[in-house]
């Protein structure tokens, strides 16, 4: 069972951006960075460039104390790095964390690979790992939303606590991983079938919204899919426009993805896991949240009054505060 939380509404890192910093935008509605944020392009081994929005901690580092881990954020479908930059990057940088939000290939301002889809679990996780390996000195905490959470699950399944001498550790060690409204380890097919049998109208709406991309043209459907009912129209409209532009190609081939699941069990049990969900999530249901918690042997936390896009919703601080409490409790 998930733990339900009710809410009441009232050391320096060196980055190696091998690509040029100033490039013409790929999206027609480019996201304007906030004060203290910067954008770089990390060049992957393939030669393709991955957008990274950075916001460093505003707190002075104490040389005599252990440093807080850097935070690396991974988005899901129809989103890119901007979805973290809106609220959570300022929040966590103000709390003492260096923050890095990635745009996966084919999303946001990142380059697009050849082919019809942006990649696979393996290629996306490998791109995240390459960024960490080449840019971060300390083991980070990975935070993934929706399909971004599934990418992180693949990452931690392939980490090795003690790599064999003949094996290269392709997935650098993490301090922890937070799975936020994440697609469960078995994928989204179970979610779809449960909706079909228990909530056929909701199943139709989800399919129309996401598969047919109707959220891009319907403000009410966009709100119902991603946000709370109380979200103001102007905010839903702004995020709808950004989401339209965020994904130039699908993250995955869903048929091939589901055929490759479930993700393997993790082998490095020293990595601490947070499983966090939203009571009003229109996409990931309570059973999906519980499945993820059981898979990692942790009680999931479910926040009431928050929708699927927890980091953008009008109650975005509720999820941020839960994560901050968990981060502060990580073994130092």
Image (cartoon, grey):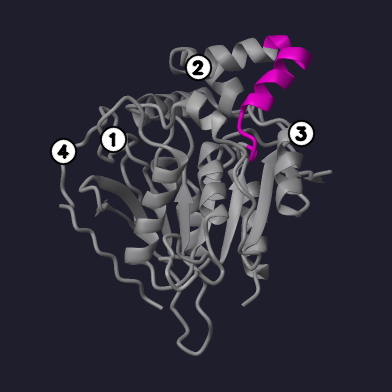
Say whether residue 9 is visible: no
Residue 287 is marked as: 3
Q: Nearer the viewer, mark 1 or mark 3?
A: 3
**Distance in Å between CA atoms under marks 1 and 3:** 36 Å
Asked if residue 248 is positioned above or below residue 45 in the image, the reply reads: above
Q: Residues within 10 Å of mark 4 (few under 14, many from 20)?
A: few
Q: Secondary structure at mark 4?
A: loop
**Distance in Å between CA atoms under marks 4 and 1:** 10 Å
Dot 1 or dot 2, earlier in sequence = 1
The residue identified by callout 2 is 211
What residue is at 59 percent from the left and 29 percent from the top? 227
Residue 24 is marked as: 4
Dot 4 or dot 1, earlier in sequence = 4
Dot 4 or dot 3, earlier in sequence = 4
Q: Residue furthest right?
A: 1
- For the residue pair 147 and 51, the one nearer the viewer reads as 147
**Distance in Å between CA atoms under marks 2 and 4:** 30 Å
Q: Residues within 10 Å of mark 3 (few under 14, many from 20)?
A: some
What residue is at 50 percent from the left and 51 percent from the top? 88
Q: Nearer the viewer, mark 1 or mark 2?
A: 2
In screen coordinates, is 110 left or right of 305?
left
Asked if residue 186 is positioned above or below residue 138 in the image, the reply reads: above
Asked if residue 277 is positioned above or below residue 273 in the image, the reply reads: above
**Distance in Å between CA atoms under marks 3 and 2:** 22 Å
Q: Secondary structure at mark 2?
A: helix
Tell me the quarter of the picture where residue 216 sits: top left
Residue 180 part of the magenta segment: no
The residue identified by callout 1 is 30
Q: Mark 3 touching mark 2, by CB under 8 A?
A: no
Q: Secondary structure at mark 3?
A: helix
Q: Residues within 10 Å of mark 2 (few under 14, many from 20)?
A: few
């Amino acid at each position: 069972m998930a733990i339900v939380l009710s809410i009441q509404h009232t050391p320096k890192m060196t980055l190696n951006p091998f690509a040029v910093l100033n490039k013409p935008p790929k999206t027609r509605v480019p996201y304007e960075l906030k004060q203290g944020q910067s954008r770089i392009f990390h060049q992957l081994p393939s030669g393709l460039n991955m957008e990274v929005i950075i916001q460093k901690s505003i707190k002075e580092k104490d040389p005599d104390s252990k440093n807080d881990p850097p935070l690396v954020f991974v988005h899901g479908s129809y989103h890119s790095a901007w979805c973290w930059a809106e609220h959570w990057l300022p929040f966590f940088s103000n709390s003492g964390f260096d923050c890095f939000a990635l745009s996966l290939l084919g999303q946001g301002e990142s380059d697009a690979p050849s082919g019809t889809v942006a990649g696979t679990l393996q290629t996306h996780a490998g791109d995240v790992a390459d960024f960490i390996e080449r840019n971060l000195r300390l083991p980070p905490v990975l935070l993934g939303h929706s399909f971004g959470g599934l990418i992180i699950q693949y990452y931690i399944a392939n980490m090795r606590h003690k790599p064999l001498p003949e094996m290269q550790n392709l997935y650098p060690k993490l301090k922890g991983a937070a799975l936020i409204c994440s697609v469960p380890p078995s994928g989204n097919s179970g979610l779809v079938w449960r909706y079909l049998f228990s909530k056929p109208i909701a199943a139709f709406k989800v399919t129309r919204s996401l598969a047919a991309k109707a959220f891009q043209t319907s403000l009410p459907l966009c709100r119902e899919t991603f946000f709370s009912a109380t979200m103001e129209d102007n905010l839903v409209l702004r995020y709808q426009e950004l989401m339209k532009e965020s994904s130039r190609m699908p993250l995955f081939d869903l048929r091939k993805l589901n055929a490759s699941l479930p993700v393997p069990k993790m082998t490095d049990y020293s990595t601490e896991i947070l499983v966090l969900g939203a009571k009003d999530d229109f996409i990931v249901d309570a059973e999906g949240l519980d499945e993820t918690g059981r898979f990692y042997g942790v009680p999931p936390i479910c926040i009431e009054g928050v929708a699927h896009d927890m980091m953008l919703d009008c109650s975005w601080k509720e999820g941020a505060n839960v994560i901050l409490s968990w981060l502060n409790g990580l073994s130092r």
